[in-house]
Image (tube, rainbow, N blue to C red):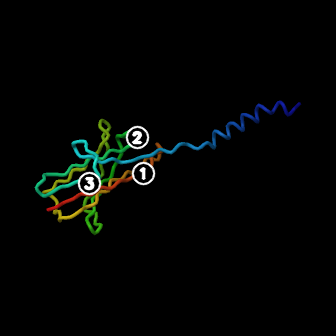
Amino acid sequence: MEFKKFVPIIIVIVSMSFVAISPVSAATSSIVLQDYNGNVLNSFSTSQDDDCLEILGYLYVDGEWKGGQKLNFDVFDSIGYNFIHYDCITKNETGYSCMTIMNYVLDWEPGDYTLRVSYGGNEDKGWPATSTTAVIKHPN
């Protein structure tokens, strides 16, 4: 009879242990690159005749854009030299951050460049790090 008194307590303890070891669904994050016309792109073109190249980076976590997060924009030349680096915060109102390259300031060599946009994650919110790449074509 003594054992029957402890059965409800044992059931509660076992139930709580299942809740404690249940897996938490992991968040997914991604970066989407667009031009100012809203076109999603993985390749951009620019020339010395253009005033500037503007690239918008949107951070998505579980399918929703997130403002107030830092995106790192890095441009590498054909030998891997990182000659442009921007840290930009995604806007709370629109969700994007923007990298603007003023073409007349840079000494672009003709060729293809690699743009890498990365996000370091947010450990407090459980948002994982992510990155994406695109090609910047510079013909002249």
Residue at image point 72% right, 37% down: 13
Q: Which comes before the other along the chain, label 3 or label 1?
A: 3
Residue at image point 20% right, 55% down: 45
Element class at badge 2: loop
Q: Position of residue 90 (x, y in %)?
A: 32, 43
According to the image, label 2 marks what residue? 63
What is the C-alpha distance between the residues marked 3 and 1? 22 Å
Closer to viewer: mark 3 or mark 1 = 3
**Which of the labelled discs sits on residue 43, or is there none?**
3
Q: Indicate whether 95 appears above or below 80.
A: above
Q: Quadrant of the C terminus?
A: bottom left
Closer to viewer: mark 1 or mark 2 = 2
Please name the amino acid that badge 1 sits on: Ala
Please name the amino acid that badge 2 sits on: Gly
Name the one closer to the observer, 87 or 118. Answer: 118
Q: Position of residue 125 (x, y in %)?
A: 46, 42
Closer to viewer: mark 2 or mark 3 = 3
